[in-house]
């Protein structure tokens, strides 16, 4: 049902991956220009897929097993994003110019998303266990 706690967690994933990347830059270059996720099409695709998966998961509340699997897929997708950000940040820190770039708060959004996805999976598992225990009593 939509009033379950996992729906709130998944909505927070939607906010973290669908709305906040427009607000927080991923990094700033040495000249102070903000770099958002839309500058690289691959980042845009990954953020969009993560957002779409969270919406599909919220709307698929009747099938808890599918919710669980889609959340796992979303976690893997966010780990790929983190890997790309780590690779990019290692490249950024090796600059030889006198202008040093800053990492932005947007790089940490996949970590926040993973946290909420794990909490949602825990709540989905708890609901599934509750339904199974009620089925045993019948």
Image: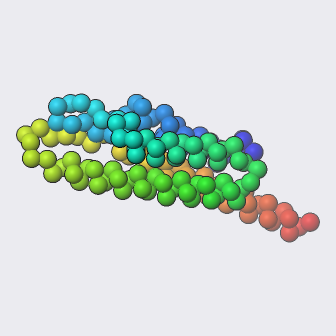
Q: Residue 106 location in percent, x, y?
A: 37, 40
Could you tell me residue 131's position as x and y percent?
Answer: 79, 60
Q: In this view, does 96 lie above or below 66?
A: above
Q: Quadrant of residue 134?
A: bottom right
In this image, 47 relative to 100: left or right? right
Q: Is residue 105 visible?
A: no
**Residue 99: x percent and y percent?**
11, 38
**Residue 127 visible somewhere in the drawing:** yes
The front one of 58 and 133 is 58
Question: Dividing the picture into quarters, in which one does residue 69 lie?
Answer: bottom right
Residue 116 coordinates in the image, percent (x, y): 53, 49
Residue at the farthest front position: 41
Residue appearing at x 18%, y 49% in the figure: 93
Residue farthest bottom in this picture: 136
Q: In which quarter of the image is the C terminus?
A: bottom right
Position of the N terminus by quadrant: top right
**Colouring scheme, one of rainbow, by chain, secondary structure, one colour:** rainbow
Residue at the spot 67% in from the left edge and 60% down from the top edge: 125
Label total for image: 0
Furthest toward the right, the residue is 138
Question: Vertically, is 78 above or below 33?
Answer: below
User: Quadrant location of residue 44?
Assistant: top left
Q: Is residue 62 above or below residue 134?
A: above
- Closer to us: 10 or 21: 21
Picture residue at 36% right of the left edge, 56% below the top: 83
Which residue is drawn at the image coordinates 68% and 57% (left, top)?
A: 66
């Amino acid at each position: 049902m939509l009033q379950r706690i996992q729906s709130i967690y998944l909505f927070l994933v939607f906010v973290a991956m669908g709305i906040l990347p427009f607000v927080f830059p991923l990094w700033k270059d040495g000249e102070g220009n903000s770099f958002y996720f839309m500058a690289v099409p691959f980042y845009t695709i990954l953020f969009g897929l993560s957002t779409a998966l969270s919406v599909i998961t919220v709307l698929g509340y009747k099938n808890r097993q599918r919710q669980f699997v889609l959340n796992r897929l979303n976690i893997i997708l966010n780990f790929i994003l983190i890997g790309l950000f780590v690779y990019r940040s290692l490249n950024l820190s090796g600059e030889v110019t006198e202008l040093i770039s800053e990492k932005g708060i947007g790089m940490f959004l996949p970590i926040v998303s993973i946290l909420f996805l794990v909490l949602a999976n825990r709540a989905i598992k708890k609901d599934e266990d509750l339904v199974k225990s009620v089925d045993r009593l019948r």
